[in-house]
Amino acid sequence: MSAGVRWWRRVLVAAGVAIAGYALVGALTDNDVNKFGVPLFLVVVLVLHDAVFLPAVLGAGAALRRFVPRRARWSVQAGALISLAVLVVGLPPVLGFGRAADNPSALPRPYGWGLLAVLAAVWAGVAITATVARHRRDGRRDAPGRRGVPGE
Amino acid sequence: MVRDAGTSVTGRARAAVAWLQAPPDTLRRGPFRPGAFGSALRSTRLTSQLGVALGIAFAICFLTGVTSHLIQHPPGWFWWPSRPVSLYRVTQGLHVATGLAMIPLLGAKLWSVYPRLFSWPPVPGPARAIELLGIVALVGGGLFQVVSGVLNINRWYAPMPFFFTAAHYWVAWLTIGGLLAHIGVQLPVVREALRRTPPETPAPAPAKSANDGLVADRPDAGGSDAGGSDAGGPDAGGPDAGGPDAGGPDGPVATRRRLLGAVGAAAGVITVATVGQTVAPLSGISLLAPRRPDTGPQGLPVNKSAAGARVRRAALDPGYRLRISGPRPVALSLADLAALPQHTATLPITCVEGWSASATWSGVRLRDLAKMAGVDPEHAVAEVESLEAAGRYRTSSVAAPHLRDPLTLIALRLDGSDLHLDHGYPARLIAPNRPGVMQTKWLSRITLRSMS
């Protein structure tokens, strides 16, 4: 490790610790910060993510590897990844707890249909990409002199 | 001394630490088993690349967020201009759009380092214990920011046992602190991993450094999916091969580049599906955006309604007066206001929640009212108050650049008709380059002060 890197490491770690300390002092002295609610929420989202969400994703991934035929596997994996990210953004408006009778301009759309449409577009995109890639691959494989060329 | 180890407090503590650093192997079960995480996709290089992208996203969110906070709670040294008119619209739109787009990045990053959570022994020493504490701040803080942000833009407050704004602000500082320390700790690993040649191929591991097993699974080319069999050479080898060669007759296998592509595609889909709440031309295809810029009373969204603010009666009272305090105080009825010179400005309403919409406002210039009250508008500030009896956003301050600006209006009309009650009838403030919560509605009083 060069001296420059060592210097940067020290500066970054010191600055990080100082800023985190500033955050703790600031949060503790700000009357608008709920001293129980904020740490509780932080720990709950961390535990839910690491102990529930990610294991579930890994489980689904293992099932996918087992049951999806190899030729379609990566396409399905990619589609599932994108769909999962879309769900995180799309589920809150679909559930619609933020709707208010006195303010129809908040959450004005039919989000259930919107989510279905976005997911349909994602899987259509995945299918098109896979088909195009397959055609390109087949084309190249059929080309003469392709096989056995070193360094390809 | 040694004999005391079983009884004295320090002896017990020492024994406990020793046990923690070398726990019995019989406890090494479940995810702690060697090779419990099978994906050959995980690599230091993947983690580093996701980390760099995520770091940039965090930086954008932090800087734009702190800017928004400073505008709303300006300390003495802070100065925010009134032009360009849409600057805040851009910074706050970017804040929310970046926060949403980082969701797949954050998910993939945490997935890529998940096995580290189960390294063995779990806490080999004090350095690792401190590093873990920093990672709790960083990961917990990052998840806190993203989850609370998503809940807030969807106005779903029930799951959050706190006042969002203050919590989101301070946890941002905590997260950035954790991030800087994390970058410091991982700097040599990241530098090594991002070299042009993948470090996995030539050397068994990037030295000892701080890498204490950053990534448990070394990517092994091809893996059980023998797909990439004809990809060879150190430059194209293994999961780094992103070209069509990585797909054998059995179809494409997952590679690092493909995974990065999918993560990027997810960020893109999320952006297109939501950014129309501030980029109006895209509102037709932003099917998951919490707002439409053209939907609301008079075709404009509303954050707080008159009913919600409990101002209906006071706002509709025929005896309404707007009181201007200054060296020459005046009280103006709606007719008085309408009789003053009227001006029109096209200005955006920009909500901190990330939506924005342009509209054409007409009314009296705030600088004209300042002159009327006996204050030099070039060197003055104002405090504006709403008819609301209570509430966090009942008042706002108008700093000198905005008070001076001829585009800053006490608006009476929106797109040619009287203001809708929900847009602040009888009169509201509308100023360029300012958060929506500071565009005070249902004005009752304006206090003008000369700056000495």
Image (tube, coloured by chain):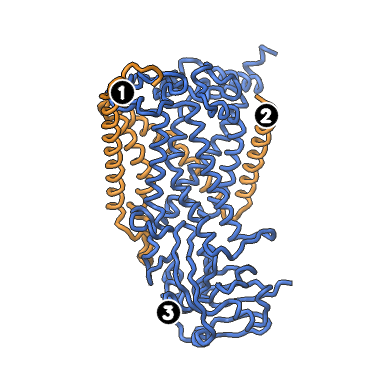
Chain colours: A orange, B blue
| Outermost residue to the front | A144
In this rendering, the answer to whether A95 lies above or below B39 is below
Crowdedness of circle 3 by 10 Å Cα count: few (<14), some, many (20+)? some
Crowdedness of circle 2 by 10 Å Cα count: few (<14), some, many (20+)? some
Badge 2 element = helix
Q: Give residue B418's mark.
A: 3
Residue under pointer 1 = B248
Which percent across, then down, holds residue B442?
49, 75
Asked if residue B382 lies left or right of residue A91, the reply is right
Asked if residue B235 lies left or right of residue A139, the reply is right
Q: Give residue B329's mark.
A: none
- The kind of residue on which mark 3 rests is Asp
Q: Which of label 1 and label 2 is nearer to you?
A: 1
Name the one closer to the observer, A17 or B289.
Answer: B289
- The kind of residue on which mark 2 rests is Arg
Residue under pointer 2 = A6
